[in-house]
Amino acid sequence: MKKILHNNFFIETDYLPDIKILHEEITDVWEDANIAWGEYISNATNGGNMSKFFIQEINAPYSDKIASIITHIFSEFSITSNDYKCTFFKILPNGDMPLHVDQKSTCSFLIPITNNTGALCVQNEIDYEEIIYNKMIALNTLIQHGVKPPSEDRIIFHIGLRDINFIDLI
């Protein structure tokens, strides 16, 4: 797997699993992120309102297909995690996710399921970067990050790690 580090914000890769496998795992049941994660997002930069943002948590034990994807990613990054959570994120056209710092995860793997039209924004005190990615990235979730409004549904498969630091992925 090819890996390119960007400003200690994220690692760009050339990895994309069979998206059909991930599509099969998505159900029609989505939760409004403002309700499901109300306390969590209250610390977001714009006062804690995620417009048109929905989540679908995937509970362990994960299906064999998802477990295989996770195992492959962990192997490629030479990590072992015992505390991670998988979620699908969906942002509708003209919705957004404000800049925020995660409260539970330290880094995440993000895999686009649909055409990724909403730019991921990352910033620290010095640098700011926007990326529209079409392959998996590893994101440092302890820095400010958010998503600009997409022009079409934006669905991401997310693996949030709680016991691995971003530096361990480099």
Image: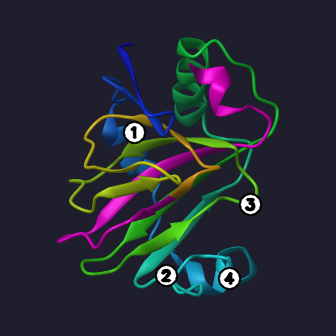
Residue at x 57%, y 78% (from the top left corner): 33
In the visual, does 169 lie left or right of 85?
Answer: left
Based on the displayed image, in which of its 4 quarters is residue 163 positioned?
A: top right
Q: Which circle's residue, 2 or 4, is located before the other in the chain?
A: 4
Depicted 157 relative to depicted 53: above or below: above
Q: Earlier in the sequence, mark 1 or mark 4?
A: 1
Q: 10 Å neighbourhood of mark 4: few (<14), some, or many (≥20)?
A: some
Which of disc 1 and disc 3 is earlier in sequence?
A: 1
Judge the density around disc 2: few (<14), some (14-19), many (≥20) Cα neighbours within 10 Å. many
Q: Circle 1 is placed at which residue position? A: 21
- Range drawn in magenta: 145-170
Q: Would you say the residues marked 3 and 4 are in contact, meaning their CB atoms lie under 8 Å apart?
A: no
Q: CA distance from mark 3 to mark 1?
A: 29 Å
Q: Which residue is mark 2?
A: 50
* 15 to 138, vertically: above or below: above
Residue type indicated by callout 1: Ile
Residue at 35% over, 24% down: 15
Amino acid carrying label 4: it is Ser
Disc 1 crowd rating (10 Å Cα; few below 14, some 14-19, many 20+) is few
Residue 72, percent from left and from top:
53, 18
- Can you give x and y, in whole percent of width and height, for residue 22 in the image? 42, 44
Whether residues under marks 3 and 1 lie with C-beta atoms below 8 angstroms apart, the answer is no
Q: Which residue is mark 4?
A: 42
Callout 3 secondary element: loop
User: What residue is disc 3 on?
Assistant: 103
Residue 60 screen position, x and y as percent: 74, 46
> Which numbered disc, 3 or 4, marks the residue that appears first in the sequence?
4
Going from N to C along the chain, the mark reached first, 3 or 2, is 2
